[in-house]
Amino acid sequence: MSCGQTVALGAYLLGSLDPSERSSFERHVHGCSHCRREMVRLAPLPGLLGQVQLADLELPFDDPVPDPDLWPLPPAPEPEPAPAPPKRRRLLLVGAAVLILLIIVSGLLVPRLIDNDRVDDDAAVTWQATDTGSGVAASADLVRKSWGTELWMTIENMPKGMRCKLIVHDRAGRTEIGGWWASDHSADERIPGSTSFPVDQIERLDLVVDMKVLVSVRP
Ligand SMILES: [Zn+2]
């Protein structure tokens, strides 16, 4: 099975959809198992892209062949869709280009990142914090993955209409962006994020709006 909306996934993961497109795509992913599967497969990549060196993209041709599970799914025959309006079409083309880049990078990087010991995969911990200044309360579930850490945030008392991002700090002082989203979500919504840092190397998660840290979540 394939889905015509999967092309928006690349733009979604890189935070380049505008807030209304973002929430409509999130609603779609909720009900689309194909897009959800692709999202889980590609979720670690925005964090990894921040670490990609040009040299990684110019590997010799004898690099190991990627796992067949990581190859793009073959397109299924589909009825010709109605032509999209120009703006939407341009967005989809950008999304498709980004998605292709993500798939190429995943083919290059993911096989080398998958470690042999997957026994503890999916072990989760929960960190919580409330900032007395901003009043914002955040809870983060951190799920250990072979590629790093999957993050699930729930946030209360966020000012509406903001664009917030999650900055992940590791113990060595490095940072990654764990996710971007619009704050017009309900208080009980679980917001997905990801980082290539392993759980035990994460020092804290900062929820940032307009360069200001609203709450820091620590172990
Ligand atoms: Zn879909």
Image: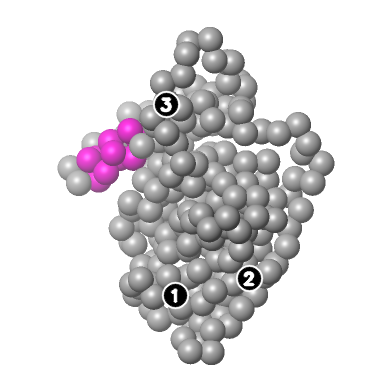
Rendered view: 10 above or below 2: below
Rendered view: 32 above or below 24: above
Q: Residue at x 48, y 62 (%)?
A: 167
In front of the other: label 3 or label 1? 3
Q: Is residue 216 magenta?
A: no
Q: Secondary structure at mark 1?
A: strand
From the top left corner, tell me how far across and down residue 127 is, in percent. Answer: 67, 70
Segment tinted magenta in the rendering = 88-97
Q: Is mark 3 within 8 Å of ligand 1?
A: no
Q: Which residue is mark 2?
A: 218
From the top left corner, tell me how far across and down residue 119 is, in percent. Answer: 82, 41
Q: What label sits on residue 114 in the rendered view?
A: none
Residue 15 visible to an observer of this rendering: yes
Q: Which residue is mark 3?
A: 55
Rendered view: 186 above or below 30: below
Mark 3 or mark 2: name the one nearer the start of the chain: 3
Residues marked 3 and 2 touching at CB (< 8 Å):
no
Q: What label sits on residue 213 in the rendered view?
A: 1
Residues marked 3 and 1 touching at CB (< 8 Å):
no
Q: Secondary structure at mark 3?
A: helix
Mark 2 or mark 1: name the one nearer the start of the chain: 1
